[in-house]
Image: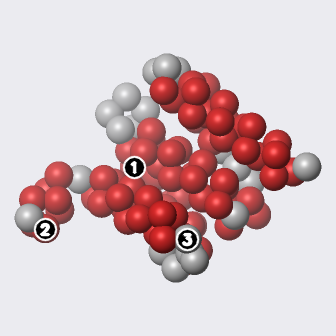
Amino acid sequence: MLKIRALVRYIHGLIYQGTGDLRTAINYYKVPDAERTNEIGIMSTLNLILILGGSVHKDLHTATSLLASIESVASAHPHILIQGAFNLVSAALEGPETANLMR
């Protein structure tokens, strides 16, 4: 039952993010620390990091802290798509300067 609620909450966040209501999406993506270790919690946190790392709701301190809080679980996750999503968000948060160095 909790997984279904978490999934519905995540989907609500996706809908609000997709329609540009980032403030509401942020509220849906916030998950308790204990839930950040499951797939839905990781994806919610990654989407929250993307929003906080953007220009409108920029909060790099919180975004960096959230990224560090899921790094050990997400970077070694058994699902390769979770690992990939984590790596993409990490690179996006580092900024274009780092991306240019990697080219």
Q: What's the amino acid at mark 3? A: His
Vertical placement of residue 92 versus 19, above or below: below
Instruction: Give the number of callouts.
Output: 3
User: In x, y percent, where is residue 101?
Assistant: 9, 66
Q: Is residue 88 left or right of residue 19?
A: left
Which residue bears the numbered disc 3?
79
User: In x, y percent, where is residue 86?
Assistant: 44, 63
User: In x, y percent, where is residue 67?
Assistant: 48, 62
Q: Quick one: quadrant of the C terminus?
A: bottom left
Question: Which of the two marks, 3 or 2, is nearer to us in this view?
Answer: 3
Which residue bears the numbered disc 2?
102
Q: What's the amino acid at mark 1? A: Leu
Which residue bears the numbered disc 1?
60
Which of 65/35 is in front? 35
Disc 2 residue crowd, few under 14, some 14–19, many 20+, Cα 10 Å: few
Query: What residue is shown at x 30% (from left), y 60% (from top)?
Result: 91
User: In x, y percent, where is residue 22?
Assistant: 51, 27
Question: Which of the two marks, 3 or 1, is nearer to us in this view?
Answer: 3
**Whether residue 44 is visible:** yes
Q: What's the amino acid at mark 2? A: Met
Distance from Cα at disc 3 to Cα at disc 1: 27 Å
**Whether residue 27 is visible:** no
Q: Is residue 37 left or right of residue 97?
A: right
Q: Looking at the image, is mark 3 or mark 1 earlier in the sequence?
A: 1
